[in-house]
Amino acid sequence: MEQNYEAQIEAILFTMGESVEIGKIAKALELTNAQVKKIVKKMQEELADSSRGIRIIELEDAYQMCTKPEMYETLIKVAKQPKRQVLTDVMMETLSIIAYKQPVTKAEIEKIRGVKSDFAVNKLVEYELVEELGRLDTPGRPLIFGTTEEFLRRFGVESSETLPVIDAEMIEEFKHQAEEEVTLKSND
């Protein structure tokens, strides 16, 4: 009798609710990772149909079943609307530094930003976008931080290696904008 692997994978992802490593799925179904990837790819294509409300996303060698973003409006009408976590400019700046420099210490973040970053880092940890990865093996043993799977999900990125690359032209534009802000502030 032929196994219905799609149904089994769907049941695993639905029941777990979080991402499940490809290797764990393969082991449970007694398949290779490549076979699981092929089956999930087919499932992703089927779920891409506009008549479907869910999708399967890949997050660093793991899969997760989740609601399509275009379904959020409908869900909000049914469920009590959760308090939306607001990311301030300071928090976005701190999150960007962590995402691109990870693993990174608070001292490194503060050196780049030029100001204390305790509040922003703590809020990002609270929002589960950033996590403590351990301690650096240097005097004082400072904590090191990196992004989480929740960060990947929220920003639609498969892995930290696939973050958009900032080119030299954009960096120059950012520097120019920062210099203009400093000039405006000093003239006030």
Image: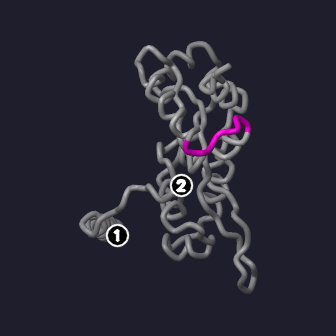
Sequence-first tag of 1 and 2:
2
Q: Considering the image in quadrants, where does the C terminus appear?
A: bottom left
Check if residue 186 falls in the magenta segment: no
Q: Residue at x 47, y 53 (%)?
A: 89
Q: Residue at x 48, y 17 (%)?
A: 52
> Could you classify mark 1 by the number of other residues whose Cα lies within 10 Å: few (under 14), some (14-19), or many (20 or more)?
few
* Region of the chain picked out in magenta, as a range: 28-34
Q: Nearer the viewer, mark 1 or mark 2?
A: 2
Q: Residue at x 58, y 49 (%)?
A: 61
Q: Is residue 173 left or right of residue 85?
A: left
* Residue sticking out furthest to the bottom: 139
Q: Is residue 60 left or right of residue 28?
A: left
In this view, 4 is above or below 26: above
The residue where tag 2 is placed is: 91
Give the numbered dot on residue 182: 1
Secondary-structure class at tag 2: helix
From the top left corner, tell me how far across and down residue 82 is, in percent.
63, 28
Can residue 187 be seen at all in this image of the molecule? Answer: no
Specify the amino acid type for callout 2: Met
Check if residue 31 falls in the magenta segment: yes
* Residue sticking out furthest to the front: 1
